[in-house]
Amino acid sequence: MKEGVSPLDEGTLYVARFNDDGTGTWIELSTKNALLSTWTLDKILVHTRLAADVVGATKMDRPEWIAGAPTGEMYVTLTNNTQRGTTGKAGVDKANPTAVNTYGHIVRFKDANDHLGGTFNWEVFALAKDVTDAAGQMFGSPDGIWVDPDNRVFVQTDGEQPGKQNDQLLVASGVTKEFKRLFTGVKGSEVTGVTVTPDRRTMFVNLQHPGDGDPSISNFPAKYEGLGGPVPRDCTIVITRKNGGVIGS
């Protein structure tokens, strides 16, 4: 996107309401909506979450990334929400089914009428839970997400992991929903950003803020005041298969 250009310069903004029966509705956020008739457009665009509350949108568990699949489906990572179901906060619902949602989840939806309709169908694609929970997946805090042309879903994590594992990159089948770990980051780092070469045989991912949360290894310039050793640095990792195949296959 060019400098000085905003995605809010043109078009109409909508917010989602997830119904318990697996359907959903896109609600217009504009002064044309009777519930926002006393608002100005600039107020709606600045205080969007408050406007969404007014029109009855679903409160979600910290949406992060959105990715489209070749099937027309869209995937949304919901990193976590430890306030879900606590006093004074939104309770659990079908789209956000975990109270005190430490590890997050992923929702998948598909618009009606080829992205032009005002409704959609949705499902919970994966619940990220503790490894001891047989119904959950062994990862937490899903963040980055990308879907390849063969409907493989690549998920990157940033935050709380079951068993205090490091953040990771996983790949799942968009059909069977089976997850497999592809890459693990260093301690304290977020795995983020994903792109591939046109033949999908080389993948690039980033490790961000390694050592985060541990001042003994990440504070600058403390490392140069007698503690010794290098300061952890952000970096970009290149991933290839030993047999030269497509990443994730």
Image (cartoon, grey):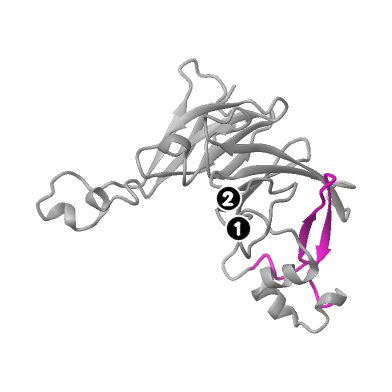
The disc labelled 2 sits on which kind of residue? Val
Pick whichever, 48 or 69, lies toward us.
48
**CA neighbours of label 2 inside 10 A, class few (<14), some (14 to 19), many (20+):** some
Q: Find residue 245 and report its horizontal and vertical position in percent.
A: 55, 19
Q: Is residue 226 found left or right of 62 in the rendered image?
A: left
Q: Find residue 61 and report its horizontal and vertical position in percent.
A: 63, 53
Q: Find residue 74 and report its horizontal and vertical position in percent.
A: 73, 44
Task: Determine which residue is flagged by label 1.
Answer: 86
Q: Residue at x 60, y 58 (%)?
A: 86
Pick whichever, 88 or 52, lies toward us.
88
Report the number of numbered marks: 2
Above or below for 48 versus 158: below
Mark closest to the chain's N terminus, 2 or 1 = 1
Q: Is residue 92 found left or right of 185 in the rendered image?
A: right
Pick whichever, 38 or 241, lies toward us.
38
Pick whichever, 241 or 232, lies toward us.
232
Q: Looking at the figure, which quarter contains the N terminus?
A: bottom right
Above or below for 1 versus 247: below
The single residue placed furthest to the front in the displayed view is: 87
The single residue placed furthest to the left in the displayed view is: 226
Q: Is residue 221 magenta?
A: no
Q: Residue at x 41, y 38 (%)?
A: 164
Query: Which corner quadrant of the image does residue 127 belong to?
Result: top right
**CA neighbours of label 1 inside 10 A, class few (<14), some (14 to 19), many (20+):** few
Task: Determine which residue is flagged by label 2.
Answer: 100
Residue stretch rendered in magenta on the structure: 6-32
Q: Is residue 83 found left or right of 227 in the rendered image?
A: right
Residue 249 - label: none
Query: Which corner quadrant of the image does residue 17 belong to?
Result: bottom right
Query: Which corner quadrant of the image does residue 170 belong to?
Result: top right
CB under 8 Å between callouts 2 and 1?
yes
